[in-house]
Amino acid sequence: MSRRQGSGRRIALRGILLASVGILAACAPPFRAPVPLRPPPDSPRGEAEAMGLVIRATVLADEEAQLELFRANLILAGLLPLHLEMENRGDTPIEVHRARIEAWDERGERLLVRTPRQALRQLFEYYEVTAYRIASRQDLERAFANIAFAFTPALAPGETRRGMLFLALPEEPGPRQPPERLTLTITARRHGHPMRSPDRVGTPRTRSSETFALTLRIARP
């Protein structure tokens, strides 16, 4: 399929979705937060490990899968949904609530992290949903927050945590495209190990915590 045909298909799809959302908004939530969330097996993915922390990330780039999961095409709305998994294989907790997340596409364009509420607002604005019940909007906000990756509390030893991360695509003319490659860097902090002084008896001291970064390069398998 040519790029022009693909653009035409996306524009037509947006028109269909706008009409569908307008009908749904009056009687039911126009979007949904899928639970459980299983990315298609051929989705772009990457994995990295450092200091006992394993991070796996999968991009939900397929348009049809997004429609089935969210009842919306997030790419058209300028959002890139990312399924994030963190596993702590160490013996001390890892603080991720202050984690710094940076994402770049193959052109060097930066993708900014959006909160679940910001992502949902972007969907409402793109699909021009103005007629909806307040209770439905609140239910959707809670649902999107529930499927988002939880950065609190600290990741305990042996714990594996999963959730969604929403990235804002760079502004560009015409229909949005998912990146061909994505570089994701996450900076976290591991607590220090307990350390008892050899000449004193009492509460053990703790080695200072360490900050470290993992970089994932995400591409299609």
Image: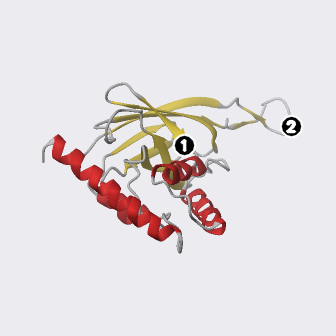
Compare residues 127 and 77 and report the one nearer the observer: 127
* Residue at point 61%, 63% (across, down): 137
| Mark toward the start of the polypeptide (1 vs 2) | 1
Compare residues 131 and 49 and report the one nearer the observer: 131
Residue 88 in sight: no
The 10 Å Cα crowd at callout 2, few under 14, some 14 to 19, many 20 or more, is few
User: Horizontal and vertical percent for residue 187?
Assistant: 55, 32
Q: SS class of the residue under badge 2?
A: loop
In this rendering, position of residue 113 left or right of residue 73: right
Dot in front, 1 or 2 = 1
* Residue at point 45%, 70% (across, down): 23
Compare residues 177 and 153 and report the one nearer the observer: 177
Query: Residue 114: which numbered mark, if any?
Result: 1
Q: Quick check: 168 above or below 148?
A: above
The 10 Å Cα crowd at callout 1, few under 14, some 14 to 19, many 20 or more, is some
Disc 2 marks which amino acid? Val
In this rendering, position of residue 197 left or right of residue 133: right
C-alpha separation, residue under disc 1 versus residue under disc 2: 49 Å
Compare residues 115 and 20 and report the one nearer the observer: 20
User: Horizontal and vertical percent for residue 44?
Assistant: 31, 47
Q: SS class of the residue under badge 1?
A: strand
* Residue at point 60%, 68% (across, down): 136
Displayed quadrant of residue 173 = top left
Residue highlighted by disc 2: 201
User: Horizontal and vertical percent for residue 62?
Assistant: 30, 53
Q: Quick check: 130 above or below 178?
A: below
